[in-house]
Amino acid sequence: MNYAHLFEAAMLICFGFSWPLNVIKAYKARTAKGTSLAFIILIITGYIAGISAKIINNQLNYVLAVYFLNLAIVMVNVFVFIRNVRLDNQKSAIVTKQKIRELQKKYKNVGYTFSSEENMNFKELNKIAEKNSVILLGSSMAKDIPVTELVDSFGFDFKLYNRSEENLSVKNAKEFFEANISPLEPEAVIIHIGEKDLKLFGTSASDFDNYYMELLNSVTSNQSRRVALVSVNNKTGDAKISEMNKHIKALADSFHADFINLDNAKLWNPKATKAAVDFAASMGLRTKKPLKNIAEILYSYACLEMQEDIAHNEAV
């Protein structure tokens, strides 16, 4: 009897005994919180390395079978983790929808337009807001996005504020930015304006471009600030709006800003984006989240989820 192989097998059995218990615990918990995918992948890599060493040394015995058994059990943990992430996403979506409905009902009852900032004065809000945050700057559609609720639901580890004004136009956007947003010294700004400028664009596209450039010059005065431009929503396929969005895309390219095309909103999957963000966090990645991903999460709900809730409330 080869005692070295026996003791190695005993070590593997003792080491691997905790994994079936971990599978059962994770399956019953129905949540991925507290589980490190990076740690599981590290263990899998270790087992693969051990199996490779056995094969290279031609040690094809019962110890190798124990390696494969442990590897299979650890792999089950990965599948349970993926299932639990999906369950977490479903729970988050349900909670977010419920919060949106509650807020819509609240504002409807008091006669306000639905707004996550409760129509408070932005200068007053800035006194309690944190600097170096991400800001959403827009008009009607952007104003209705429940930023605070979405930040909580998606577990963003940064501050995101909605500084949108109902009738904001490119004509007064620069002044609005300098008065209400610039004092916050944001590290990133998502801009969604143009809804109130169709008449101006139809009369003089060059004036529209000039006003927009004045805003962007002010926003990008801090060269390290990230900027993203969102297209005007064009559900009816209006030719004038399509042309305006081409100008906005050109402005984004000119200022090296991200461009978010709302025509693609139906293709976005905020839950998948959240899963990717969670995966990056579990791997220990703490890089800045791309503005494009943040905007897609916000406007997925603006274009899809909020419309469904409004239709539901009207039906009730």
Image: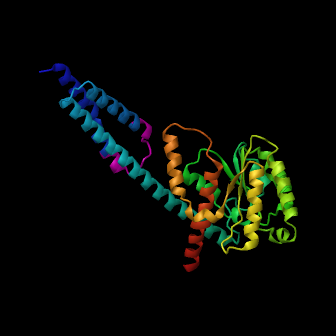
Residue 257 % position (x, y):
72, 50
Is 107 or 255 nearer to us in this picture? 255
At a point 79% along the width and 66% down the height, the residue shown is: 167
Looking at the figure, which quarter contains the C terminus?
A: bottom right
Locate the N terminus by quadrant. top left
Which region is colored magenta? 24-39
Residue projecting furthest to the left: 1
Establish if 232 lies above or below 9.
below
Q: Quadrant of residue 16?
A: top left
Q: Is residue 210 left or right of residue 151?
A: right
Q: Position of residue 243 (x, y in %)?
A: 76, 67
Q: Is residue 112 above or below residue 15?
A: below
The residue drawn where x is 82% and y is 63% is: 169
Residue at 26% x, 36% y: name it.
68
* Residue at image coords 53%, 59%: 269
- Tell whether 24 sits left or right of 308: left
Q: Which of these two is toward me, 152 or 154? A: 154
Q: Position of residue 255 (x, y in %)?
A: 77, 49
Residue 201 x %, y %: 83, 68
Residue in the foreground of this view, choosing between 197 and 263: 263
Is residue 190 toward the left or the right of residue 85 in the image?
right
- Whether residue 89 appears in this view of the structure is yes
**How many dots with numbers?**
0
Q: Does the magenta-highlighted stretch encompass residue 49?
A: no
Q: Nearer the viewer, residue 131 or 14?
A: 14
